[in-house]
Amino acid sequence: MKIKAIIRSMRLRTLPLSLAGVLLGLLLALQSFSAGWPLIVMLLLTTASLQVLSNISNELGDFLHGVDNEQRGGPQYALQKGELTVEQLRKCVLFMEIFCYICGVAMILLSFGTLLEWEPAMLLLLGIAAVWAAKHYTLGKRPYGYMAMGDLFVFIFFGLVPVIGGYFVISHSLLQIEILLPAITLGLFSVAVLNVNNIRDMQTDEGKRITIPLLIGKSAAKVYQSLLIIIGWCCAIAFLVIKGSTYGYFCLLTAPLFLMHLRGVWQKNGSSLDPMLPMLVIATFCFSLLLGFGLLM
């Protein structure tokens, strides 16, 4: 297999978005709890491996369903260019699926020391669900990403699960109900990344899958994009008010990036929207770091 082609299919530029939530959950937990480096590293590795599994599964699914073609607005990947065969990418998907399970079990054992109590058992079941969701966004006979359900799954598995799950792996506690607010924020920002991707691909997606922008139209989808980010910020501010942390407000430094993103979304269409994706990913990642480290201070 061609290593460069496989790396391109991993879409490593998406990793900051997947790591943003779990890093925020980790930093929130470290305010009151401690964790060893092996656990922290395994937590991040598990999250990153799930993202890679999702990316290569999405490429395989989109290719098999005929969504990835020469009219697609985004970057071309290995299957579309003929650099990898379907069978080679299937093997990559299987390898990453096994690797996700190995990392997840190791993370749980490092955190709880066992799989046989109810807390680690529930975490293991959540991990199995996360692996399934990572694989079946576009892959399989009935991919949920083709039925306008991608937004819901992204909200859950890029917002609620990584923030709350990252916090729980370190703290073994879910007592702080306000943890829901930053989890909702990360979920909404992550849905916004998916939504702008779907706005960009409306022309090539039509007739092949159902997405929110195709259901509500381009103008309404841009209003939806604005609401996702505005409501996300409202939840973040509410969280900071509850916590009473002065340094947590450092996350406001990322607000101009979000505003630039929204301006670009309203001004651009089609393939010209592609730069808006990494801009929002970087903004979300920086937001998580500044909020998390600010609270630690």
Image (cartoon, helix red, strand yellow):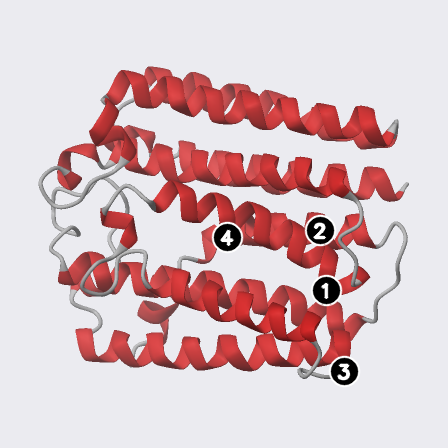
Badge 2 is on which residue? Answer: 25
> How far, Cα to Cα, is label 4 from label 2?
13 Å
Q: Callout 3: few (<14), some (14-19), or many (20+) C-alpha neighbours within 10 Å? A: few
> How far, Cα to Cα, is label 2 from label 3?
21 Å
Q: Secondary structure at mark 2?
A: helix
Q: Left or right of 267: which side holds 216?
A: left
- Look at label 1 and name its amino acid: Val
Residue shown at 28%/33% (left/top)? 212
Which of disc 3 and disc 2 is earlier in sequence? 2
Badge 4 is on which residue? Answer: 157
Circle on res. 113: 3
Which of disc 2 and disc 1 is earlier in sequence? 2
> How far, Cα to Cα, is label 1 from label 2?
9 Å
Query: From the image, which quarter does the C terminus lie in?
Result: top right
Residue shown at 11%/55% (left/top)? 66
Badge 1 is on which residue? Answer: 169
- Look at label 3 and name its amino acid: Gly
Quarter holding residue 55: bottom left
Residue 282 screen position, x and y as percent:
55, 40
Residue shown at 42%/76% (left/top)? 97
Question: In the displayed structure, would residue 54 be above or below residue 264?
Answer: below
Q: Is residue 78 visible?
A: no
Give the camera-side residue of 182 and 10: 182
> How far, Cα to Cα, is label 3 from label 4?
25 Å
Residue shown at 50%/20% (left/top)? 260
